[in-house]
Image (cartoon, rainbow, N blue to C red):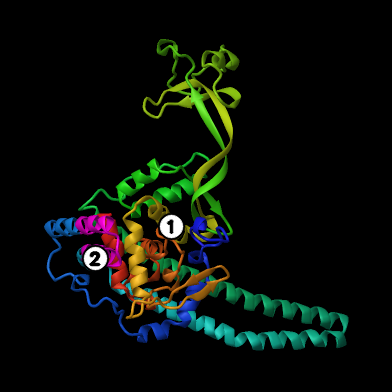
Amino acid sequence: MCDGINDPAGPRRCPSQRGERRREYRRAMYAAQKAAAIIDPTGPDPDDAAPPGECTAERIAAARRAVDDAYAAYTADPTTESVRRYEAAVRSAGSLVATEVDAEIATRLDPTELERIDAARSHVRELLAQQIAEKRAVEQEIHDMTRQLRWLGPEERVERLTLIQAKTADFNARTDSIRAATVEVDNLELRRGAAEGRIAAEVLGRYRDYGTVVPEVHPMSTSRAQALTAEAANAFPSAWMRDSSASTRLLVKESKARAYYQHKSMVRISDNTDYDYSDDPDSEQTWTTRKAMPPAPEKAPVERMRELDWPDGTNPKWVAVRDPETRRWAWKLRMTNNGLAVMSELRVPTAAAGPDESRRIAIHEMSHRMEAINPRIGPACISFRDRRTSNPDGTLHPKQRYAKTEVVRPDEFVDVYVGKDYKSTVHSEVMSMGMESVFGGSHGGLQGHHGYRADPEHRNLILGLCATA
């Protein structure tokens, strides 16, 4: 679960971090490859495929104006027809960007790398199939050898136990080797997809400030979580990250059990506030290095608190602080405030997940924050999901149980989780799954790589939102 505030059961493990998603779609891979092309129930949209030729800045600018007009019409008259027109305008803009991105990818990245990754995946699958086939035989052999122990003498029993342990260790070692190889191929897929995502961000950067702003996070966020958030920010428009800093304060933490985003949560915090040594700037002493500072100020903390008319907080003490602009050191009075605060809470994986997987998940969860902050994202994404999961008569596809407290409406999405129904006018999994695919490298980048189903509509929607919202 990614956005706990909209789920009755509260935040739980994000399925984008679980293994069944990948296993499920490997089992369905053959069927997906044979499935029919995605059909838009509203009829074909000629704008989904950009005409050949260079995607010029003028065409992108015109597409952005069309999106602005469609969004204005939707907000003035929020009907199904107006939101569908807005969604189509976003996808049309995205198709222009996609054409330019694809041209850059073809020029700058090695196309044979995809074939090598797929060959490595096939090899790992062959090893896994062989290991599964041998598992029953090895288990039976060890079982028979164990039963015979009772009839053996002491020396023979020791030899037999040693042999059993060796066979078990050998089988487990091969299993661990296959598991490690699987993870490595997973990471190769993510790295290749992330490289394509970086190119997409560069192309988008030609038309708006992109990937240059790191959002502010609460100081209680761990240093690794802050670094991971900063890395994920490269996948988002700079304006979105500035809006994030101006919105509900964000606390980012690591979690072994789950990754999720909750827009408003009561969080127990410990905030520090630093005050100058004196109200008189002329008496404010600074030093070039920490070693040059005296052991402690002569003024007692309580004396400075009296001058400040008793500021809020507890545990007053003098601390050495370095000014980030002047790079000089000074003594500051630090007051600590403990209590509860309403914050946005984002959980990312621990280092055990690996850098590639961690970045993918951070992009996924940060996308949920963008849904809550940017009002242009939700209508387009929910329109996309509802349109794709609708019958020709306008009725929605029946819901299917995805997890204990989660339901989805299936379609030919790259992942059934894209069709999750939050019963929300803001949140869906369209944006988050799309962003992690296009910029984080998962699901074949929505381009049909690595056996995944291509979904150009979804990719165009994501690129269009990143270009215009």
**Does residue 364 appear to the left or right of 265 in the view shown?**
left
Of residues 460 and 72, the one nearer the viewer is: 72
Of residues 123 and 357, the one nearer the viewer is: 357
Q: Is residue 438 visible?
A: no
Please name the residue shown 34% across and 76% down the image.
Answer: 394
Does the magenta-highlighted stretch encompass residue 79?
Answer: yes
For badge 1, the amino acid type reads Arg
Q: Nearer the viewer, mark 1 or mark 2?
A: 2
Q: Quadrant of residue 120?
A: bottom left
Please name the residue shown 45% across and 57% down the image.
Answer: 365
Seen in the picture, residue 196 relative to 287 is either above or below; the reply is below
Q: Which of the labelled discs sits on residue 359, or is there none?
A: 1
**Does residue 136 appear to the left or right of 22 in the view shown?**
right
Question: Which residue position is annotated with label 2?
Answer: 85
Seen in the picture, residue 462 relative to 277 is either above or below; the reply is below
Q: Which residues are magenta?
A: 67-95
Residue 407 picture location, percent across and down: 50, 71
**Does residue 43 appear to the left or right of 267 in the view shown?**
left
Label 1 and label 2: CA atoms lie apart by 33 Å
Q: Is residue 354 visible?
A: yes
Residue 307 picture location, percent across and down: 52, 13
Q: Quadrant of residue 461?
A: bottom left
Seen in the picture, residue 104 relative to 120 is either above or below; the reply is above
Residue 21 picture location, percent across and down: 49, 72
Does the magenta-highlighted stretch encompass residue 240?
Answer: no
Which comes before the other along the chain, label 1 or label 2?
2
Seen in the picture, residue 76 relative to 442 is either above or below; the reply is above
Q: Secondary structure at mark 2?
A: helix
Quadrant in the picture for the C terminus:
bottom left
Q: Which of the labelled discs sits on residue 132, or is there none?
A: none
